[in-house]
Amino acid sequence: MMKKLAIVLAATAAATTSAWAFPDRPIQLIVPFSPGGGSDVAARVFQTCLKDHFDGQVLVKNVTGARGKIAEVEVRDARPTGYELLWAHQGMDMGKATGRSDYNYTAFEPVASTVAMNYGIFAGANSGIDSVATLKKDVKANPGKYSVGMALNGFSHFAALDFMDQAGIPVDDIRVIPMSGDKNRIVSAIQGNLTLVPTAVGAAKPYVKSDDLDAVAIQASERDPSLPDAKTAQEQGSDSNFAMYFTTFAPKGTPKDVIDTLAKAWVAAAKDPACQAKLQQQAMRAVPASGEELKKELAQRYQRIEDLADKFNLHTQK
């Protein structure tokens, strides 16, 4: 009996020491995309924010390939210690909704949501499309005349579908041009090779400022400070709200005290005005959430993605 008690006490002490000591080595924050892209920039800006709120060292590691799946699987299958974390947006859920993968956010332990990038619908300045009303009117009068560039089954695809669905624009009346890369789509729109570009506000901002692109609608509930003159979709009678949210995930089974330690630091950093100013400089915003609040938000975002995939028959597209 005494021996069993000693074992239990030793195990309890070890667990307590482990939790107290976390982290005792650098943490890898794994980004599923290449250096320099939006996901990478968001992660690295937030990494600098963590320095004032987290005792441990966080290293950003880029693991590319298979549209994010290689990084996602690496973290999903890692030991649940809290030392390997995933920095992911809803693209992971889009993979599940379209049949490209067999998992979504529920395969991980959510730590915290911290950063968001507003998305919008933009058009080449020579297209004559500068508002939701103009677009709806012209598409109705000329079905098939206008086009939209998007990465099929990717974020730009779902953002465009959400916008057209909420605005009441028949998807079949706008030609789809498969095209990956924000810059490729933006340049094509400026050159007149396509009409509409669904993209992050930060990617479009310099071209709107130079009058090469017009902002048709920002897919957010409030105007984006980066483009304060650009109207939201909601201001124009459409309920499209489709930002890219970056959430940090840990492997399933990561101890709750480790998740809580990470979440507390992540949320504190996102609430820091200095961090928010850094994010705003990159056309991003802080969206701190953790715990049950975050789980509810993740479920709502996935449901919208699943609804769009159902409505527009994306499940069979690989």
Image: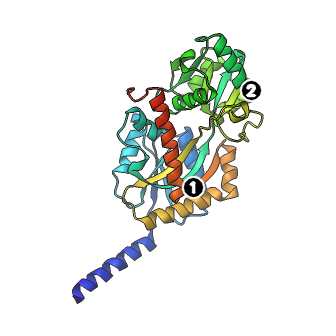
123 displayed left or right of 303: right
Q: Position of residue 209 (x, y in %)?
A: 74, 30
- Compare residues 215 and 231 and report the one nearer the observer: 231
Question: In the displayed structure, would residue 255 be above or below residue 13?
Answer: above
Classify the position of the N terminus by image quarter.
Answer: bottom left
Classify the position of the C terminus by image quarter.
Answer: top left
Q: Amino acid at mark 1?
A: Ala
Q: Can residue 28 be seen from the camera position used here? A: yes
145 displayed left or right of 298: right
Q: Which mark is residue 149?
A: none
Contact check, label 1 and label 2, Cβ < 8 Å: no
Q: Amino acid at mark 2?
A: Ser
Q: Earlier in the sequence, mark 1 or mark 2?
A: 2
Q: Quadrant of residue 226?
A: top right
Q: Quadrant of residue 165?
A: top right
Q: Which residue is mark 2?
A: 210
| Residue name at image x 60 percent, y 19 percent | 188
| Crowding near the residue tagged with mark 2, few <14, some 14–19, many ≥20 C-alpha atoms within 10 Å | few
Q: Position of residue 80 (x, y in %)?
A: 36, 59
Q: Which residue is mark 1?
A: 289
Q: Can residue 23 be seen from the camera position used here? A: no
Q: Position of residue 266 (x, y in %)?
A: 56, 58
